[in-house]
Amino acid sequence: MSQLRFDYTTSDWVVFAPLRKLRPHHAAVVEATHPDATASSTESCPFCPGNERLTPAEIDAVRTDPHNETSWQVRVVPNKFPVLTIEESNGRSQDGRMFQHMGGCGAHEVVIESPDHGIFFGQLPAEHIELILKVIHRRYQDLKRDRRFQAIIIFKNHGVGAGTSLRHPHWQIIATPIVPRLSRLKFVEATEYFDRTGNCLYRDLLHEELAAKERLVAANEEFVAIIPYAAHLPFETWILPRRQQPTIDLLQAEQFRPLSEILKNVLLKLYVGLDNPDFNLTIDMAPRGDEEKEYFQWHIRIVPRLTTPAGFELGSGMSINTVLPEEAAAFLREGDTGAP
């Protein structure tokens, strides 16, 4: 049973999720270090076609044949080892003045992006990536209907160093009953900037980056990829929409293909240029209640795991970036993705 406990020293909640320790980390490590183990792994992989019985009951799917269980292209299932669960209460309790906790209420879903056990996301056709993004969009819209959920975190881990426990490519969606502190801080900064200037912080930032050009990685008619001026980690890359959109809820039908294309392009650049690095990808959005306010702009953050935070970073909370954003952007911008 999961539980959230409040840390008064940081004004943040900590999730205690005992089930997470049962995840099959060993399988991912074996595949990463012994490529010849992949074939046997697919036989027991719960995300491979034919093994649908190994996952919890399906939530959503896209199939080529609705009568053929194994014909799916994208599939969504509850996480077998969830951080939070829908069945739990979000009620809060107090054990003494300093010990506040609440039930592990939320949702934890897995979006299996392809039947292919080993294909890299950026190597998928743009039309298939579009399918994945539309399914994620649909799941976001469905989860936000539950009024208990205050934030919905959408992310993808790639590689053992990024926290992957199963190699088969997938995304995850976690809905939480609170807004995490880091998100709250970003929203506070964006709100204060809007109050001072009347402008969206992220739209002004994008405007300045487009004018400067030196940190641009890629762009199309709907989206722009940059390495931010103050990127916290080497090759940290953002993808921002050109339209004013606080959440992905406002994505229009004609935006999905350009988003698919630029995401594919950026991930291929990282894959080729940095020799398939482990990375974490997140989609940052405004919280519940602010979905249509102009102070925030949703964006994708891709963070390659090229360095390990050490004592200074942990002690100070500051980041050390060993690669200037201008140099990183030029390297990616000029690199060959290997795509036809």
Image (tube, helix red, strand yellow):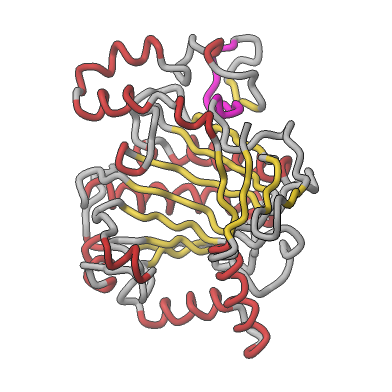
12 and 187: which is toward the camera: 12
Start-end of magenta stretch: 69-80
Residue 227 appears in view: yes
**Farthest residue, direction front:** 96
| Residue 273 rendering spot, x and y as whole percentages | 21, 52
Q: Residue at x 57, y 62 (%)?
A: 181
Rendered view: 17 above or below 252: above
| Quadrant holding the N terminus | top right
**Farthest residue, direction bottom:** 196
**On the picture, is 134 further left or further right than 217?**
right
| Residue 104 rendering spot, x and y as whole percentages | 66, 40
| Residue 68 rendering spot, x and y as whole percentages | 60, 10
Q: How many marks?
A: 0
Image-quadrant location for residue 58 = top right
Residue 216 appears in view: no
Image-quadrant location for residue 25 = top left
307 and 93: which is toward the camera: 93
116 and 190: which is toward the camera: 190
Q: Residue at x 56, y 50 (%)?
A: 14
**On the picture, is 219 further left or further right than 179?**
left
Q: Residue at x 56, y 70 (%)?
A: 186
| Quadrant holding the C terminus | top left
| Residue 320 rendering spot, x and y as whole percentages | 27, 69
Q: Residue at x 59, y 34 (%)?
A: 109
Magenta residue check for 39: no
Image-quadrant location for residue 27 = top left
Rendered view: 31 above or below 287: above
